[in-house]
Amino acid sequence: MSKTKKYLPYLFLTILVLLFCVWFCLKDGVFGSNLDWINQHIVFPDYFRQLFYDSHQLFM
């Protein structure tokens, strides 16, 4: 078996995975939607920040 044929399946799988990643990122975006990302990444930190301000303790 030649060297080229030996690595052809690996090259094919690599290209397939990269195309799938590009398709996924262009179709839905990395985080789904912008509102979903904002809700997930703003609400929880804000909750813990308010809890810290109320109790003045970093760890409960």
Image: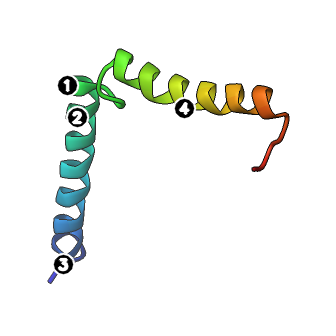
Question: Do callouts 1 and 3 mark residues in contact (Cβ within 8 Å)?
Answer: no
Q: Residue furthest bottom?
A: 1
> Where is residue 20 drawn, in percent x and y?
20, 42
Label 1 residue SS: helix
Judge left or right: residue 3 versus residue 37: left
In the picture of the structure, the residue carrying the numbered disc 4 is 44
Q: Position of residue 34 (x, y in %)?
A: 37, 17
Residue type, label 4: Phe
Disc number placed over residue 27 in the picture, else none: 1
- Marks 2/4: CA distance? 26 Å
Query: Pointers 3 and 4 in contact (CB under 8 A)?
Result: no
Q: Which residue does the image show at 76% across and 33% down from the upper left? A: 52
Q: Counting other residues with Cα less than 10 Å from the Cα at mark 2, is it few (<14), some (14-19), or many (20 or more)?
A: few
Res 53 → quadrant? top right
Question: Real-space Cα distance between discs 1 and 3?
Answer: 38 Å
Amino acid bearing label 2: Phe
Q: Residue at x 24, y 75 (%)?
A: 3
Look at label 3 and name its amino acid: Ser
Label 1 or label 3, whichever comes before in sequence order: 3
Judged left or right of residue 51, residue 45 is left
Tell me what residue is drawn at x 45 percent, y 20 percent.
38
Q: Secondary structure at mark 3?
A: loop
> What residue would you read off at disc 3?
2
Looking at the picture, tell me which residue is in the foreground, 37 or 25: 37
Q: Secondary structure at mark 4?
A: helix
Q: Nearer the viewer, mark 1 or mark 4?
A: 4
**Residue matched to label 2:** 24
Q: Are marks 2 and 3 in contact (CB under 8 Å)?
A: no
